[in-house]
Amino acid sequence: MWRRHWALITAISVLPGGLHAATTCPDSGIAPPAEVTLAAAASGADDVAVLVKNSDCDEVTIDAIDSDTPGETRINASYVDIEVVESYPAVESLWLWNNKIKTFKAVGTSVIEIDITSNQLTSLDGLEFPSSCLELTLDLNKLTSTKASNFPGSLQKLYLRKNSIESLAKFRFSSKLQQLYINGNQQLTTLEGAVFPDSLQYMECSDCRITEIVGVTFPSSLTKIHHICQFVSSQQQHRFLWQLEFQRKLYDRLRH
């Protein structure tokens, strides 16, 4: 009887994932994930992130590199099928191109630039960006609209190029937004109902199909709208846009 009991204990102890299986992955310190996950290092290092590929804790480290701004660092975790951004080190820039991101958790206050180009996003539900983010790129996704809570309050530059946006009426932009890029949204035919913040200075909308801007009030801070054509506007809006075009031509002439 004693031998049988000892054999049973021995068998259990050697089973994969048995009683002594780790409850967290060693490098990232997170619970074994069901989806490909990006996380900060469990060590707390500011110069490395950890890609956790599966629930078996298959982990790969991603070293930070210098960003385009001297003294700042970046994690480039592109083309690795990330679905969940659980956490990240204290870097200033995150590049996450060509992944499958569905969840993004706001962590820390160091990140000022986030690039989630080409992630097949249809909405921003499940994505929470840190309040420190000043520049957000969501190009080449399939976004149609957003909610008021989707953009951090400090955001200054927003890139929404080549999505599937049909209307800006439900967009609620940051009150500090200065530059807005909506190029290539060919379903966008009207600016009706759009509410632009008083801080907006520049808007780029080439390769859209805007034919009317009825019911839109442009902020006085707006100094340039690039490539709005074939529009129908009120007399007041037409005068405003003409003044912007005149200022642009005068600036170009003086510069050369």
Image (cartoon, rainbow, N blue to C red):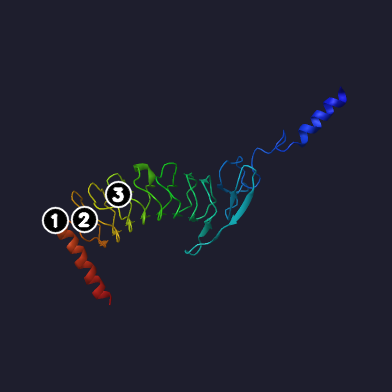
Q: Position of residue 43 (x, y in %)?
A: 63, 48
Q: What residue appears at the point 52 percent right and 55 percent down from the top-left corner? A: 91
Q: Which residue is mark 3?
A: 166
Q: Position of residue 138 (x, y in %)?
A: 41, 53
Work out whether 25 lies above or below 200: above
Mark 3 is surrounded, within 10 Å at the Cα level, by few (under 14), some (14 to 19) or many (20 or more) other residues, namely: some
Q: Position of residue 179 (x, y in %)?
A: 33, 57
Which quadrant of the rendered structure holds the N terminus? top right
Mark 1 is surrounded, within 10 Å at the Cα level, by few (under 14), some (14 to 19) or many (20 or more) other residues, namely: few
Quadrant hosting residue 219: bottom left
Foreground: 34 or 42? 34
Q: Secondary structure at mark 2?
A: loop
In the picture, measured across the screen, residue 85 lies left or right of residue 227, that is right
Q: What residue appears at the point 74 percent right and 36 percent down from the top-left corner? A: 15
Which mark is drawn over residue 236? 1
Indicate which label's residue lies in the foreground, 1 or 3.
Answer: 3
